[in-house]
Amino acid sequence: MSQNRQTPIILTPPTYASLPRPVVARVDDRLPGAFTPWHRHDWWQLTWAVSGVLAIETRDGSFMAPPARAIWIPPDTEHQATNAALTEMRSLYVASPLMSWAEPRCKVISITALVRELILALSALPADYDEAGEAGRLVQVLIDQLTHLPEVAFNLPLPTESRLRRVCAELQAHPDDTRTMAGWGELVGLSERSLARFFVQQTGMSFGDWRQRLRLLLALAALERGEPVTRVALDAGYASPSAFTAAFRRNFGLTPMEMFKHSRHGSP
């Protein structure tokens, strides 16, 4: 889910025959326009952007990690990763036996300042750290802390029905398209009422709410780069910065300024 028009920098997903330790940290500083193609692995992944905004796409939806948020990806989930701006990424690969408490689905969570520092500390250690020593105790604290982190709504569910997928793809490519739902229905051969009903059935969201969430999620990277809210609001199809800010706060619980002033810190 990206408006990025840069030539993509294709990255190769890391490969492990098996994890050298039950929890392994990975450091990945990604240049603007980086793209990791579809892949899957046998363990859980928690991916977090120290700076920048990371986008993960699965076959079922899109997930965005702005500052102080991270994305859980269950084992055997096919996914790809993109970032529009320079992004410092840290990932945890976690063996499934440690995740028996987790619901097996992708989700975005809010991370605390403590979890942030624990991930950074683990990222500085070799992959074959001493499990019986200080590093092992750090990992135990980290896993305990991860069980308490709340889910947040930085995701966008995707429908499976082909006509609805076409509408979503068009809107992802052109989020400022102001066509009415009747106009979209005409494009794909559905009545306005049928399109509205199918959209709720397939995504759990109304068409209007889905389109608004899309626009707001796509605006995250521009806000992280420090672009003026006025420009971001107009590019996202809003009539004014105040309308954009109100929608942003209604969806995410913070204004753009409140969210991005914490870019280098844990949750506010």
Image (cartoon, helix red, strand yellow):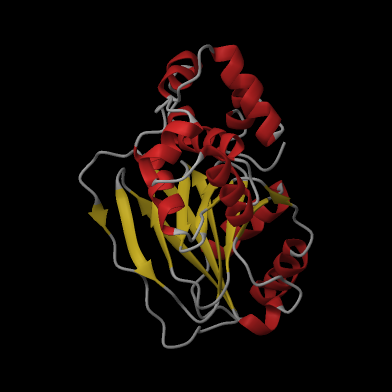
Q: Is residue 3 left or right of residue 108?
A: left
Most extreme residue toward the left, as rendered? Answer: 7
Most extreme residue toward the bottom, as rendered? Answer: 17
- Of the pair 199 and 104, the residue shown nearer to us: 199
Task: Name the spot of residue 70 as percent of width and height, x first.
Answer: 59, 53
- Of the pair 233 and 186, the residue shown nearer to us: 186
- Of the pair 89 and 221, the residue shown nearer to us: 221
Q: Is residue 201 left or right of residue 226?
A: right
Task: Name the spot of residue 259 as percent of width and height, x first.
Answer: 62, 31
Q: Is residue 29 left or right of residue 70?
A: left
Residue at (55% x, 46% y) in the render: 194
The answer to whether residue 86 of the structure is visible from this angle is no
Q: With respect to residue 127, does 148 lie above or below?
A: above
Q: With respect to residue 212, does 54 lie above or below?
A: below
Task: Name the spot of residue 223 as percent of width and height, x first.
Answer: 48, 28
The answer to whether residue 237 of the structure is visible from this angle is yes
Image mark count: 0
State the image quarter where residue 28 is shown: bottom left
Residue at (75% x, 56% y) in the render: 149
- Of the pair 195 and 141, the residue shown nearer to us: 195
Task: Name the spot of residue 230 as percent of width and height, x first.
Answer: 48, 13
Residue at (72% x, 63% y) in the render: 146
Q: Quadrant of the C terminus?
A: top right
Residue at (58% x, 30% y) in the render: 260
